[in-house]
Structure formats: C-alpha cells, structure tokens
Amino acid sequence: MEHKIQIACRTTALSELRNFLNQTLLPSKLDENELNQVTLAVEEVCANLIIHSHQCNEKDQILLAVRQESDRLTFEITDKGKAFNLLDYEVPDLKKVISEKRKGGLGIILVKKIMDEIEFESHRGMNTCRLIKLFRS
Amino acid sequence: MLSISILEESPHHILKVKGEIDASNSVQLDESIRDLEEKGAKSILVDGSELEYISSAGLGVFMSYLEEFQDKGIHLKIFSLSPKVFEVFRILGLDQLISIVSTKEEALQES
C-alpha cells in the first residue's frame, strides 16, 4: 500500500507533512514513540530540502511516498534541483555543534540514528532520498 | 501551532511551551529565551508538559544557549516532558547536557 503527499517548499508545510504521516502510519506496527521518531526523521530531511536546497521557494514542491510492507516502512522523498545527499554529509560532533552554535546538523544526526537504511540517488535533476525503517520482530 | 507563555515565580521564570516546535516557529522559542535573558533572568524553567513535538530546530535553540548560560551563571531546566518528547532529547544525548527533570517541584528544588 502506497500513500503520497506533495508539499510546497515552505516551513509551514511541515505540520501538514506530520498530519499526513500520523494518519498514514496510525494502522502500522509502530508504537507512539516510534511513530514520533520516524515522523521526525522524515520531517528533518524535508526541512533540510525546503530550507537549504530550495531556499523556501513556495513554487517548488517535494513529493513524499510512504510504502508499508510486512517487515518495513519505506519513505521516498523526491525533489527537483540541487541535490542534497545526506550520505555525503559527515555527522557533526555534538560538542562542535554546541561550541560553534550551529543550529544545523542536529537533524542529520537524528535521521541517521532513527532510520535503519538511507539511500540516495540523483538522476536527470530528480533527487530521491529513501529512508527505511525495519519493524522489530 | 506553538504558544509560549511566561510566568514569574521569583526567582524563577517559567516558560511554558504548548504545541509543536519545528523549523517554522522555533524562532519564537529563541526570542522568548533571549528576552528573558535580556531582562536579567537567572533561572529559566521550561514547562514541557504540553509540548507535543520538537524537531532539531527547537533542540538547536536550547543547545545554542548552553555555553552562554553556563558562562553567565543562568540556570536553564526543562521539566515534565512527555516520554516521546524526552526520547528525542535522549537520542541526541541532550539529556546529558541539559538539565531535564520529571516535575516542576524537582525543577524548583534543585535551582
């Protein structure tokens, strides 16, 4: 079963994204805590794209597709434009984040800690970031 | 939706955050903390009992004050977080860096 949503590149669309994920994932095997965490990880990737790749240009769009299978959840986030490959991004040291007062970087740490697999591909200007959460048996 | 209210219970300032903090509104949290600091607050206690969600944008705000508050002797504490919101702080290891307690009574006592 696949569910899709398209959101405009503005930060106020993030709550729309959360509502969609909450509704879509409610019948899944996730408990409240896990549901909150996967929602957060997907939001962090989208927030990065909205702010850094698209500079909050509301005319740009991000597409999210959620697929539920017996052993996993797959979140496919697609956008057009400058590629932001999460996997190329070195996870910053938390102490460095504090001393340099950088507000970015925390989101990437969260995504990497919450998701089981992260894939990225860029083809003809279309970028796809795939986040996979395995169900614990 | 995020709403922030401030209550003075001398010598503390209770900053109550209600709703969800994300990249669209984390600046509100930043401004509220900055305002308190500028007013000379020495103990800021964040009431998280009605905080339903926080993303890295909100966590980053708390982190950005850690060093400065330590240098200035300003206490920042968070209390009454729900288990799922606390878990987000824990994933990042922020529970080791920020003082997080279970109840308001504990927050008041320890200050």
Image (tube, grey):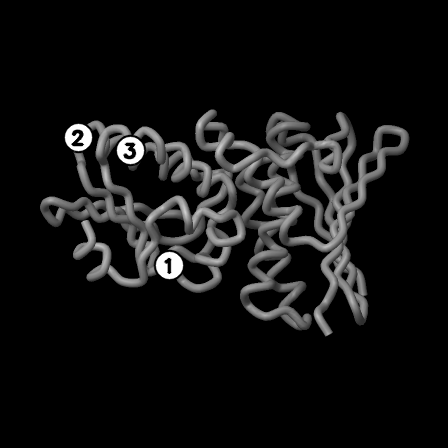
**Earlier sequence position, callout 1 versus callout 3:** 3
In the rendered structure, the residue with mark 3 lies on which chain? B
Q: Residues within 10 Å of mark 1 (few under 14, many from 20)?
A: many
**Earlier sequence position, callout 1 versus callout 2:** 2
Relative image position of residue B90 (x, y in whole percent): 48, 54
Q: Is residue B73 left or right of residue A20?
A: left
Name the amino acid, label 1.
Leu
Q: Residues within 10 Å of mark 2 (few under 14, many from 20)?
A: few
Residue visible at 63% across and 53% down?
A114
Mark 1 and mark 3, same subunit? yes
**Earlier sequence position, callout 3 versus callout 2:** 2
Q: Toward which corner of the image does residue B81 lie, by quadrant?
A: bottom left
In the rendered structure, the residue with mark 2 lies on which chain? B
Relative image position of residue A122 (x, y in whole percent): 85, 34
Residue at the extreme left of the image, as rendered: B10
- Please state, as top left, top right, bottom left or bottom right, where the C terminus of chain A lies in the image: bottom right
Name the amino acid, label 3.
Phe
Q: Which residue is mark 3?
A: B69
Residue B39, label in figure: 2
